[in-house]
Amino acid sequence: MAAALLAGQGPGAWQRLRADHVADSGGHCRACSGPSWAAPVWPCRLAVIAAEAARQSEGDGRRRGGGTG
């Protein structure tokens, strides 16, 4: 459900999440760390949601004839 909502926000929303929520050299999410908690192992939940939103967004474009494949 979260991915569908994010996909509906346009490509800018999920692209920002995908750009921010990447693995660091230790295999943890770079964006999810904080001063008092450890970052989760990547892919974090937001990276997974962003990837699903991208997939849904690309699928919507193909159904409307806007895809490139």
Image (cartoon, rainbow, N blue to C red):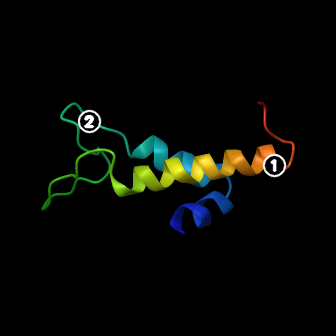
Say above or below: 8 vs 65.
below
Of callouts 1 and 2, the N-terminal one? 2
Name the secondary structure under disc 1.
Answer: helix
Say above or below: 40 vs 5.
above
Labels 1 & 2 near each other (Cβ < 8 A)? no
Name the secondary structure under disc 2.
Answer: loop
Amino acid of disc 1:
Arg
Q: Residue at x 78, y 43 (%)?
A: 62
- Report the residue marked by disc 2: 24
Q: Position of residue 17 (x, y in %)?
A: 48, 50
- Report the residue marked by disc 1: 63
**Observer-nearest of 3 and 25:** 3
Q: Position of residue 41 (x, y in %)?
A: 23, 47
Is 48 situated left or right of 28 in this image? right
Q: Quadrant of the N terminus?
A: bottom right
* Image mark count: 2
Tag shown at residue 3: none
- What whole-number distance in Å separates the C-alpha atoms at marks 1 and 2? 35 Å
Q: Nearer the viewer, mark 1 or mark 2?
A: 1
Q: Residue furthest right?
A: 65
Q: Position of residue 68 (x, y in %)?
A: 78, 31
Is 21 situated left or right of 33 in this image? right
Q: Quadrant of the C terminus?
A: top right
- Quadrant of the rendered image containing residue 3: bottom right
How many C-alpha atoms fall within 10 Å of the one at disc 2: few (<14), some, or many (≥20)? few
Q: Residue at x 50, y 47 (%)?
A: 51
**Observer-nearest of 3 and 14:** 3
Amino acid of disc 2:
Asp
How many C-alpha atoms fall within 10 Å of the one at disc 1: few (<14), some, or many (≥20)? few
Q: Residue at x 38, y 46 (%)?
A: 21
Q: Position of residue 8 (x, y in %)?
A: 68, 62
**Observer-nearest of 46 and 35:** 46
